[in-house]
Image: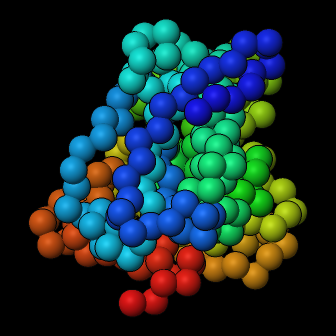
């Protein structure tokens, strides 16, 4: 699909899409849109048995290979980091708009999901275009960008300057605060949200998602559910045992399915 930049040029953003043959492209299907778009990491499409409960229930599953990832090489990564980071969010929003325009789904039928830096993506696009999404799953989300990146005593902060910028420099501060999820929460309706944090997370401290949940509860103007789920035994990757990990996935899917009206 294509999205418009501020320049006259247009950028083609790849989408990986999977669904049952019986699903009709008439805008009625629920859809789960996953994104990451940071650190040059490629979200390569692959078979996952854990997604079958969604596909069996008629959900379309989509990965948006947005800028900031590495799917199209180093230039793709550079176009979504530092002072180009806003491209990551606009690519994701445009992906959702394209899927609506092509009648894969419609507003009110889209659930979005991302973790860690992808959780920052979830927070940013929820602030920017809450009307597009029915529900959000944000796992161990990096959302308190300014406070974390201004605290050089945290073990990962200074090494992260090459990804986000150094907010001690005014141009970087002014740019980063435009998208920092926690700093951009405002009084408006938000989608239903599931925010998941881990107490033993050494990469994204549990208080980031917790602070976001508290601020959203104080400011959002809707009555949609906002769940904060705390894992007291896991780290950044969530539950590590085979069955515990499956229970985490089952919880995510139960939340997503309920929000789009699928109850069995």
Residue 109 is left or right of residue 49, and the answer is right
Residue at left 31%, top 35%?
44
Which residue in the rendered view is the most extreme toward the bottom?
A: 264
Query: Measured from the top left, where is residue 73 in percent x and y?
Result: 40, 13
**Drawn side of residue 131 relative to residue 29, left or right:** right
In the image, 224 versus 187, the foreground residue is: 224
Question: Looking at the rendering, in which quadrant would you find the N terminus?
Answer: top right
**Front residue of this view, candidates 218 and 258:** 258
Residue 122 in percent (x, y) is at 58, 50
Applied colour scheme? rainbow
Identity of the residue drawn at 55% across and 60% down? 25
Q: In the rendered image of this protein, does residue 18 appear above or below residue 53? A: above
Q: Nearer the viewer, residue 261 or 140?
A: 261
**Which quarter of the figure has residue 174?**
top right
* Marker count (numbered): 0
Which residue occupies the extreme top position in the image? 75
Left/right placement of residue 78 relative to residue 220 reads left
From the image, which quarter does the C terminus lie in?
bottom left
Residue at image point 38% right, 76% down: 57
Question: Residue 181, can we see it?
Answer: no
The outermost residue toward the left is 242
Q: Identify whether 30 is placed above or below 101.
A: below
100 over 80 or under it: above or below: below
Measuring from the top left, give residue 238's x and y in whole percent.
29, 59
Q: Is residue 203 visible?
A: yes
Answer above or below: position of 82 versus 56.
above
Q: Position of residue 228 (x, y in %)?
A: 53, 72
Q: In the displayed structure, does residue 40 sit left or right of residue 24?
A: left
Q: Nearer the viewer, residue 123 or 33?
A: 33
């Amino acid at each position: 699909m294509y999205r418009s930049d501020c320049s006259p040029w247009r950028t083609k953003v790849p989408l990986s899409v999977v669904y049952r043959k019986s699903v009709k492209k008439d805008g009625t299907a629920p859809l789960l849109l996953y994104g990451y778009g940071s650190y040059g990491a490629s979200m390569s499409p692959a078979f996952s048995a854990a997604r079958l409960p969604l596909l069996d229930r008629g959900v379309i599953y989509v990965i948006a290979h947005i800028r900031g990832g590495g799917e199209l090489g180093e230039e793709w990564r550079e176009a979504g980091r530092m002072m180009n980071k806003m491209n990551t969010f606009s690519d994701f929003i445009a992906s959702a708009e394209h899927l609506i325009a092509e009648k894969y789904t419609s507003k009110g039928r889209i659930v979005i999901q991302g973790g860690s830096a992808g959780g920052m993506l979830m927070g940013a696009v929820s602030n920017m275009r809450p009307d597009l999404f029915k529900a959000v799953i944000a796992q161990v989300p990096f959302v308190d960008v300014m406070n974390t990146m201004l605290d050089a005593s945290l073990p990962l902060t200074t090494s992260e300057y090459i990804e986000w910028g150094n907010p001690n420099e005014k141009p970087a501060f002014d740019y980063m605060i435009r998208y920092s999820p926690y700093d951009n929460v405002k009084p408006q309706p938000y989608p239903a949200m599931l925010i998941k944090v881990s107490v033993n997370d050494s990469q994204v401290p549990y208080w980031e998602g917790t602070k976001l949940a508290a601020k959203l509860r104080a400011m959002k103007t809707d009555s949609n559910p906002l769940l904060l789920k705390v894992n007291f035994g896991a780290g950044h990757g969530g539950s590590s045992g085979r069955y515990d990990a499956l229970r985490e996935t089952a919880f995510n899917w139960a939340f997503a399915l309920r929000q789009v009206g699928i109850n069995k």
